[in-house]
Amino acid sequence: MLTHCIIRLIFVLMRQFLVFLTMVFLLNLTACKEKVEHIRDKENSDPSLCVFSQGECVKTIAGIKLSFTINPSHAPSEKPLTLNILSSAPISDVHIRLEGRDMFMGIIPVNVRQVDEMNYIGQMVYGSCSSGYMVWRGFVNFTVNGKPQTAIFDFLADSDIN
């Protein structure tokens, strides 16, 4: 009889615990949804990002104006991209690499080809990020009048900003 009462007590306690676990699980699901909405708000409010769908991204380094464009302009992950660099004056020894700005995603070298002394084209592919918000940072190393320079530009992968 005592064993039967103990088994029944355990069953009743476990049933309440199961309700508690279900509530905790549902609260976690709603917390994830709020975070995703917060991330989408962030992409519209970061003025430091180059938005290639709205035009070229311009940086001035050592008196040289550099204009960057990426095609396709929404910068999709895991697809071939073409990066164009146009400078206002002759530059040389151009090397480009990509890195994650906010998280480590490896170092991705960009295969750069010189079109003329003021125009360069690079081909690249980068991986996707599971967070839904991935900012890439491009480092453009070049030489002007024998002096090394570096330009940095940030952009959002898989951007749907218009």
Image (tube, grey):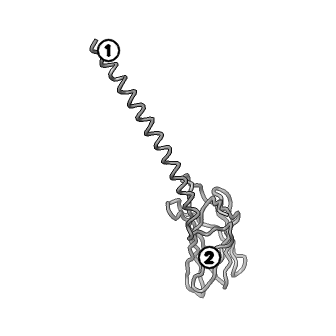
The answer to the question of whether label 2 and label 1 lie on touching residues, with beta carbons closer than 8 A, is no
Measured Cα–Cα span from mark 2 to mark 1 = 80 Å
Res 12 → quadrant:
top left
Local SS, label 2:
strand
Residue at the limit of the structure toward the right, as seen here: 115
Labels 2 and 1: the sequence-earlier one? 1
Q: Which mark is residue 142?
A: none
Front residue (pair 146, 3) = 3
Quarter of the image for residue 107 reads bottom right
In depth, the one of 49 and 10 nearer the eye is 10
Circle 1 residues within 10 Å: few <14, some 14–19, many ≥20: few
Count the marks: 2
Quick one: which residue is furthest to the top in this view?
A: 1
The mark closer to the camera, 2 or 1, is 1
Query: Residue 120, percent across and down?
Result: 68, 75
**Image point (66%, 80%), residue name:** 87
Residue 109 shown left or right of residue 24 in the figure: right
Residue receiving disc 1: 4
From the viewer's perspective, is residue 100 above or below residue 25? Answer: below
Vertical position of residue 19 compared to residue 161: above or below: above
Q: Residue at x 63, y 58 (%)?
A: 158
Residue 94: image tag: 2
Residue at 57%, 57% (x, y): give it.
Answer: 40
- Quick one: 47 or 95, which is closer to the camera? 47
Which amino acid, mark 2? Val
* Residue type of the residue flagged with mark 1: His
Residue 48 percent location from the top left of the image: 56, 70
